[in-house]
Amino acid sequence: MARLFTRIFNRTGKEPEAAPEATYRSEPRLSLPEPPLPEPPAPPAEPPTPVETAETEPAPAAPLLSTMRWGPAKGPAVENIVFLCHGMGSTADGIIQIAPQLATLLPATLFVAPNGPEYAEASDGRLWFDARDRSPAALEAGVRGAAEALDALIDAELDEAGLGREACALVGYSQGAMTALFTGLRRRPPPRAILCYAGALIAPHSLEAEMTGPLPVMLVHGLEDRVVPAFYSRDAEKALRALHFRVQTMYAPQLGHGIDGAVVQAGKQFLRRCLTPEGAGSGKARSLADGG
């Protein structure tokens, strides 16, 4: 089994008005000529306003997210990277635990699990964005900030591994699935696949204008989920199909808000089809609606 370790990145005067024309009356009995009108005084010369010519320093880049990883060391053995996004209040060391199971069909894949950019107040966990305000506008603002941080990490990891910017897939659970789905659908270039466990599609109204192209998406949801009900994935499926994304679904009848062995196995097969030459030749992904 490959080693599991943590790595932290730190990339951190107004022109005066003319005088009114004077009215001058000569006294007739003196028969003196009218004196000429005096010239208005010239305005005082103002020094020119100095112009700033110094170059402005660019703002420093925000620090990259801290990560945990599992799989082959970076080098020729790595052909792609799967990014695992944890749920609300959890951390990278939780979701990285599914990497060994996914890796059985993905031997050339490096798994990278980032910690969300925000701290959870009630625990030692992390958040991708603050979700206390559940209004659509607040959720969209939050996930956009999270997507910016995640996208920067993805670019940095792929560049360091010497891989193309498209050689990746995004996997997420709960809030991590919402972040992975929002980020991946708008990423340039798009990833090779997105796998969402118990997630939701945030800001569907902006997707058509912002999406980068139809790519394979798998939505997995437990029908007994009381935290993020399964209708969120059904709504996401409908919206994505309308925009011609290749969507595979799995709705697990007895699963609550979680991930079990069966849905990990289904996700593994999906990633294999999208990330490996062997999988690409195994046929199109089929839809498993309600376990059918």
Image (spheres, rainbow, N blue to C red):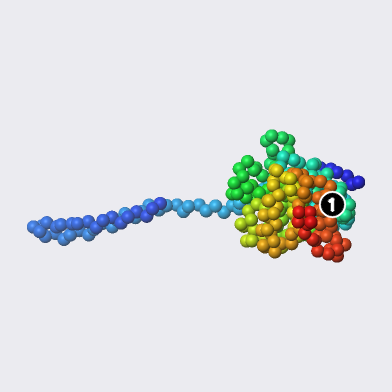
Residue at 67 percent across and 60 percent down: it is: 211
Q: Residue at x 64, y 61 (%)?
A: 208
| Residue closest to the far left | 29
Classify residue 255 as left or right of residue 235: right
Q: Secondary structure at mark 1?
A: helix
Look at mark 1 in the image and give the residue it sits on: 265
The quarter of the image holding the C terminus is bottom right
Q: Is residue 11 above or below residue 285?
A: above
30 left or right of 186 in image: left
The amino acid beneath tag 1 is Gln
Q: Quadrant of residue 246?
A: bottom right
| Image location of residue 279, percent across then percent down | 85, 61
Q: Is residue 61 visible?
A: no
Give the image location of residue 154, x and y in percent.
75, 53
Residue 127 at x, y percent in the picture:
70, 42
Graded by Cα atoms within 10 Å as few (under 14), some (14 to 19) or many (20 or more), the crowding at tag 1 reads: few
Q: Nearer the viewer, residue 16 or 261?
A: 261
Q: Position of residue 141 (x, y in %)?
A: 62, 49
Q: Residue at x 84, y 56 (%)?
A: 269
Q: Residue furthest top?
A: 122
In the image, is 77 to the left or to the right of 125? right
Which is nearer the eye, 133 or 248? Answer: 248
